[in-house]
Image (tube, rainbow, N blue to C red):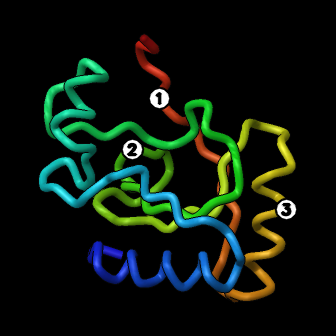
Amino acid sequence: SSSYADALASARHAAKRLGFRLDLRGLTPHQPAGLTFSPADCQQSAFEYPCYVARGRGDDGAYVSIEYSTAYAGFRPGLYVVIVASDGKGGRIAKDAFKAAKKRFKDAYLRRTGVYMGCLH
């Protein structure tokens, strides 16, 4: 969705229906970044504010979150995307979460994409 409020409503609904925890990582909407961590979190990670790091960097699991599509290869940029899981290539977590989501949400789909790892410090 181009609306964070709509994405948040969908994420809350999905978490409740799936029984997954809602994990927004403390992110808030911020233009032009799309989403950002708090100024303190950005500074602690040695990033300028606003800062956003895509999921998929050591946070595998089944959860519901809102992520910014611009940070993911193959996604239309500028949208808030409701994610229900993350894991590495060949993992079962996302596949199992997708099966659960597809039973409850007809428009759910599974997409694997690369995530920029950058400098991990």
Pick whichever of labels 3 and 1 is earlier in the sequence. 3
Contact flag, marks 2 and 1 (Cβ < 8 Å): yes
Badge 2, how many Cα within 10 Å: few under 14, some, many 20+? many
Quarter of the view holding residue 5 = bottom left
Q: Residue at x 13, y 51 (%)?
A: 32
Give the residue number, with chain letter if any, for mark 2.
71
Above or below — where is 118 with respect to 29? above
Give above or below for 75 relative to 89: below
Q: CA distance from mark 2 to mark 1?
A: 8 Å
First of labels 2, 1 by sequence position? 2
Q: Give the residue number, with chain letter if any, for mark 1.
A: 116
How packed mark 1 is, by other alpha carbons closer than 10 Å (few <14, some 14-19, many 20 or more), is some
**Image depth: mark 3 or mark 2 in front:** 3
Amino acid of disc 1: Tyr
Q: Is residue 82 left or right of residue 71?
A: right
Quarter of the image with the N terminus in it? bottom left
Which one is closest to the eye, mark 3 or mark 1?
3
Residue type highlighted by circle 2: Ala
CB atoms at circles 3 and 2 under 8 Å apart? no
Q: Quadrant of residue 28?
A: bottom left
x and y percentages locating residue 13 in the rendered image: 54, 85
**Residue 46 in picture, x, y percent from top left:** 25, 18
Name the side, left or right, on which 53 lies relative to 108.
left
As helix, strand or loop, the secondary structure at mark 3 comes to helix
Q: Is residue 53 above or below residue 10?
A: above
Return the residue at label 3.
96
How many numbered dots are placed on residues in this image?
3
User: Image point 71% across, 76% down: which residue?
Assistant: 19
- Residue type highlighted by circle 3: Asp
In-front residue for pair 92/16? 16
The answer to whether 94 appears left or right of 120 in the picture is right
